[in-house]
Image (cartoon, rainbow, N blue to C red):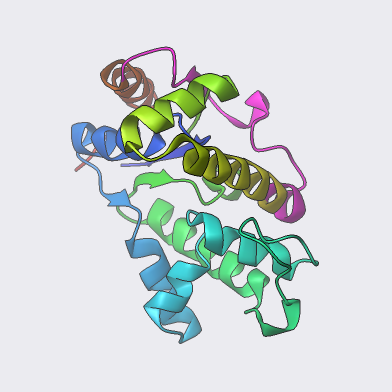
Amino acid sequence: MGVVTISAAYGAAGAEVAPAVAELLGLPFHDRAIPAQVAGRLGVPVEEAEANDETVVRGLWRLVASLGTMPDPVGGVLPTSALPDARAYRQQTERVLADIASGAGGVVLGRAGAMVLRDRPDVLHVRLDGPPERRFEAAVARSGRPAEEVRRQMEANDRSREAYVRHFYRCDPAAPQHYHLVVDGTAFPVETVVDLVVTAARARGIVGA
């Protein structure tokens, strides 16, 4: 068993790498199930938990905005009084991750997993990153969306995720000391990155049942 946490900068192929790693290791891939569990713990609709999930750019800006007034990336300023308690979502997400690590394990994408589970020996922490321009080009190629739209989303994503981790965990999510393995996700094919992560996970004894 065990857990692989994958922190991925926008355009570094996290959404492609994480589920592929889970499949090869025979572990569950925990993604959309996490906000569902958070919703159940907080007694709120799943849609509300998803809107405040760390992996949703717009929702993440809502969380960051609730820590203090910050500009909304699509215009205007978000009113903090109308927002849910960001700390409650963060605390429940941490508890879900702890339950995953204590249970069947799995692969977790995002959600500051490397910070939440940093003290556990049965976890591999991975960071996927890359030069901004190469991440941008990769994101445009994968999504097929207009370049301007991708650029806006990338900038909002990078800034909001960094603000979230800096506020709650007082550290830089891109700093290499938080991870066992740091890979430039723009320098290799996705299959190569997956192989690197799987090899590292197996070396730490992380495998499915």
Q: Is residue 68 above or below residue 12?
A: below
Q: Along the line of sight, which residue is nearer the eye, 157 or 34?
A: 157
> Relative to the observer, which residue lies in front, 141 or 50?
141
Residue at 53 percent across and 54 percent down: it is 57
Q: Residue furthest right?
A: 68
Q: Is residue 183 visible?
A: yes
How many marks can you see? 0
Q: Is residue 183 magenta?
A: yes
Q: Which x, y percent locates residue 153?
A: 53, 45
Give coordinates of residue 66: x percent, y percent: 72, 70
The residue at 52%/46% (across/down) is 113
- Left or right side of 98 for 168: right
Q: Please report the residue visible at 62 percent of the width from the left and 66 percent of the height from the top.
A: 62
- Give the image location of residue 112, x and y in percent: 57, 48
| Rendered-image quadrant of the C terminus | top left
Q: Nearer the viewer, residue 156 or 191?
A: 156
Magenta span: 165-189
Q: Position of residue 164 (x, y in %)?
A: 67, 53
Does residue 122 appear anywhere in the picture?
A: no
State the quadrant of the N terminus: top left
Q: Quadrant of residue 91?
A: bottom right
Q: Is residue 191 left or right of residue 173?
A: left
